[in-house]
Image (cartoon, rainbow, N blue to C red):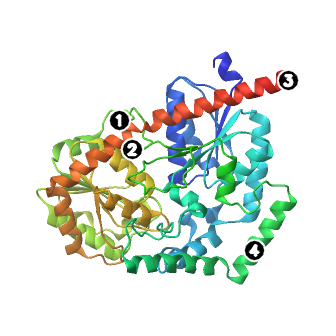
Amino acid sequence: MTGNDRDRAVLVVAYNSAGMFNPLLNIAGELKARGVGNIWFASTEDRRADVEGLRGPGEVSFVSLGPARPQSSPDSWDDATYRLLTTGDRATSFARYLDVSTDYGHVRQLHRRCLQVIDEVGPVVAVVDSLASWAMDAAQTRQLPFVVSISLPPSNFFQEQLPARYPAPFSGLPERMTPRQQAANVGFRNRLVRALMEPDRLRRSLAAVAARKAAGIHNPEMRPAGYVEAAEALMAYTVFGFEYPFATAPEKLRMLGSVVPRELPPAAGDDELTRWLDAHPSVVYVGFGTIMRLSRGQVDAIVEIADRLGPEHAVLWKVPARQQHLLPPARRLPGNLRVEAWVPSQHRVLAHPHVRVFFNHGAANAIHEAVHFAVPQLVMPFWLDCPDGAVRAVDSGVALSVERADSPDVEDILAKLARLLGEETFRARAQLWSRRMRQAGGVTAAADLVLEHRDEAAARRTVGLAVG
């Protein structure tokens, strides 16, 4: 650690959810690769190995926020809860998700732990995920400058400032709406307000606000606009044009493009997966993240789709181990289908020249990683922000979408895969947006921004101490 680093600690804070955690892990990895020291990464204990596994000459130390709250992980939900939160009306499902995922007692505990970490580490700046309100609260309490990491479409974080005609966050509606879609947009906003104002839900929310006021927290209502005003800068991992423009975006919002490591992790010594990709000149990669649970009908549909794509096209399908019981016996799987419970690096898969389409669930990381590597996409949007990601990918010309159903329309999926595989327009648009995302700077620009604010904050602190 250099002398400068010793006096300029940076604290990175994210909960364990991959969508929010991974961009910050990539930024911390870039800082470590540059040899930057005195970086502290705070997350739940289950993320320790990810942080400690970062490579490079710098120093990134893990700080535990304790165990993850069981209910915060969809893995712990029973099937009835999962379906309640992931199907039906999107506004109602979102409100129900907040009920299950938000434990105000746990939030207070995380806030207290963040205060302890700030006092122990003594950072000059924090970099905090936009959903970690408790970490932003702690930074404000300790008068610690902070930068916000926005992994969702950034308009979701600025919803209070959006005009009425802008597609409502989580609605999955496009920028250019028909009259019917405009009415649906108004209806979605109204349903969401009604859902959030239901008596029991409102009572819990008001009680939490009162407790936060009593504790002296600067933004007791947890309004995104309050955090926007307090932040030094806001980092979003897309670019305008792909994200729908909004005139109310503040100057402190930096659109950085996809945050993907500059150097992909090296292949394992016996990388059989890479050899398989090398041997198949046209591959459709299928992966629906870590939260979405496959139905029997979805599994059967994808097996049939793989069979009908062969032998010209091969299919690589990432199916979590806990869901593989839904698969037919191995002897009945098509010869062109390869199933993996886990891939060492999704980035390496998407970067392979033989991967021609990524069939995904529409989450922000999946969408933007595919764009970074110029891979056309078929999107079956899952939940929360996934429909928003899907409609932006479709509007940008890099993707087509299909409806998520327990028994998907096989013919529709095959027809759209045929277009994505056969029409050069999709590849050309993916290459265009890949260039634009990369030109925005990506992980390099994100790391530069963090260091810029670190140095500015350190200089202010030095002046303050000298004056004091």
Q: Residues within 10 Å of mark 2 (few under 14, many from 20)?
A: few
* Residue on which the image places disc 1: 268
Instruction: Check disc 4 and report its element: helix, strand or loop.
Output: helix
Local packing at callout 1 (Cα closer than 10 Å; few below 14, some 14-19, many 20+) is few
Q: Secondary structure at mark 2?
A: loop
**Distance between the Cα atoms at labels 1 and 4?**
50 Å
Between residue 208 and residue 84, name the one nearer to us.
208
Of the residues shown, which amino acid type is indicated by label 4? Arg
Position in image of residue 345 (x %, y %): 38, 43
Q: Residues within 10 Å of mark 3 (few under 14, many from 20)?
A: few
Identity of the residue drawn at 78% across and 24% down: 463
Mark whose residue sits in front, 3 or 4: 3
Position of 2 with respect to 206 (left or right) is left
Pointer 4: what residue?
A: 204
Residue 466's quadrant in the figure? top right
Q: In the rendering, which numbered label is found on residue 344? A: 2
The amino acid type, in three-letter code, at marker 1 is Ala
